[in-house]
Image (cartoon, rainbow, N blue to C red):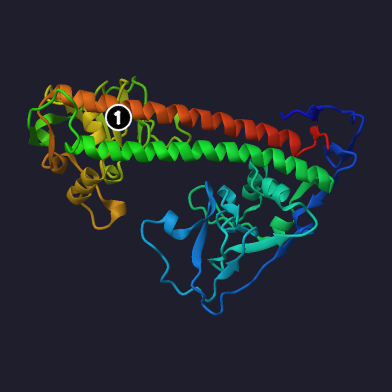
Amino acid sequence: MEQGTKTMVIQENITDTPYGYKRVGNIIIPEDWELKKFGDFVRKVKRKNIDNLPLEPCSVSKQHGVIYQNEKFTKRIATIDTTNYYIVRKGEFVYDPMSAYYGAVGRQKYNEDVVVSPAYEVFDVEGINKDFFEQVFTSERIKRLYSYLSYGGNEYWKRMKLSWDSFCGIKFPVPPLHEQEYIAKILKKQDEHIKLIIQEIEQKEEQKKGLMRKLVTGELRLPGFERDWKQIRLGDVLKERKETGYNELELLSITAKRGVVRRKEIDIKDNSSDDKSKYKRILPNDIGYNTMRMWQGISGVSQLEGIVSPAYTVLIPTSEIDPYYMAYLFKYPKTIYLFWRYSQGIVDDTLNLKYSNFKKIRVKIPSDILEQKAIAKILSTQDKIIELLEKSLDLEKDRKTGLMQLLLTGKSRVKV
C-alpha cells in the first residue's frame, strides 16, 4: 500500500458494524460512501457510422479490452461495411453482451475514433470519476457478476447474454469524488507497472522467435560446429510408442505453451474416461502431440512418466536426435505448416496428423547431436527468462487484486 494510506480491515463474519462504517443490506461500507447501481451513472451511446467513415473496426477481448480487429486476427478486416457499426470515442466503454460472462469488457483508449459491431453495448458515464469506474467495470469481482447475471447458456453450449437492464442493476460501493480520484491513481499506477512487464514479456518472446528462426534453420551457426546439416524423415528418428494398460500411472495432458504437464495442473474440466485401459504410456524424453491439433503447435517433451489420452500420439526419440531440439523445431512456423499439410480432414476442426503421415515429413537438422543440444539449451534459457517474467507478472496481478479488494470496498481508506 502506498504511503499515506490508512487501513482498516473488516472481517466477513462480523456481527457488529465497526466505527465509521455502516451496513447497507448485507454489506458494510464507510459512512460517507453510498451503494449505487451502474444505471445511476451509465448512458448508452448509439452513434452509428452512417457515413461509412474509414474507421478501424475493434472488438472486445478478455485479456486486452478494446483492441483493433487486425491485432486479434491474422488478416485485416477493414473492407467490411461498417455503416451500422457504432462509433466509439476515446474514453468510452464497451462490453459484448454475448461474451461478458467471461470478461469481454473494456474502455476505448485509442486517440482516434473506432467502430464496433452493433451487437456490442457502448456507453459513457456521468457523475463519477471515469478512471475509478473503469477499475470497477473491469474488476474480477464485477466480472463474476457478469457471468452470474448472464442468461441463456448451459454447461455444453454457452450462448450467454448479459442484458442492458441486468448490467444497469449491478450495485457497487461509491466513495466521494475526491476519494475516487485517489483510488483510481493508485490502481492506475499498478496497471502501468503490469503493462511494463507485459511489454517486456512480449519483447522477449519476439527475440526468442527471431533467435529460433535463425538457429533451427542453420542461418546462425554456433561456434565450434561446422558439420553439414542433414535431411531426415521424422519416422527415421521418432518411433511411435503405443503402450497401453498402465492405468495406475498419473494422468498427463499436453498443452501448446507448457508441453506435457500433470492433468491436475491445468484449469479445465476433466472429461477423461474412467476406463483408462486404452490410454497411452509416455516416458521422460518422449515427445507427445495432440493428433488433431499438431498443426496448432500442441506438442512437447515429457519430463514425467504417465498416461495420456488416446487422442495423443507418443513418440520415442532415437539416439540420433535431442528431443528438446526437436520440440523447438516442432514449434517453428514452417514445420507447423508441414504438420498442417500432412494432416487429413475436410476442415481444420477435423484435421488429424496420425503417425502414418507424420513419419513421412522431411526436415533438416544438425548432423551433430551436440549442436542440437546446444541450440536447445540457448532456447531453453530464453524460455526460463520469459517464465520468470511471467511469474513476476502473476505476482503484480495478485497485488493489484489485493489492492482492489481493499480500496474498492472501503476496507482500506486513502488519506486525501
Q: Residue furthest bottom?
A: 51
Q: Which residue is mark 1?
A: 379
Which residue is drawn at the image coordinates 81% and 46% (left, top)? 174
The quadrant in which the N terminus is found is top right
Q: Residue at x 54, y 48 (%)?
A: 62
Left or right of 234, for residue 199: right
Query: In the image, residue 310 lies at what x, y percent?
Result: 28, 35
Amino acid type, label 1: Leu
| Quadrant in which the C terminus is drawn | top right
Of the pair 294 and 43, the residue shown nearer to us: 43
* Rendering coords of residue 10 (x, y %): 81, 28
Q: Nearer the viewer, residue 305 or 136?
A: 136
Q: Is residue 311 visible?
A: no
Q: Quadrant of residue 287?
A: top left
Q: Is residue 192 above or below residue 252?
A: below
Figure label count: 1
Locate residue 310 relative to residue 371 in the image: left or right: right
Residue 72, percent from left and from top: 44, 54
Q: Residue furthest front?
A: 223
Q: Residue furthest right?
A: 19
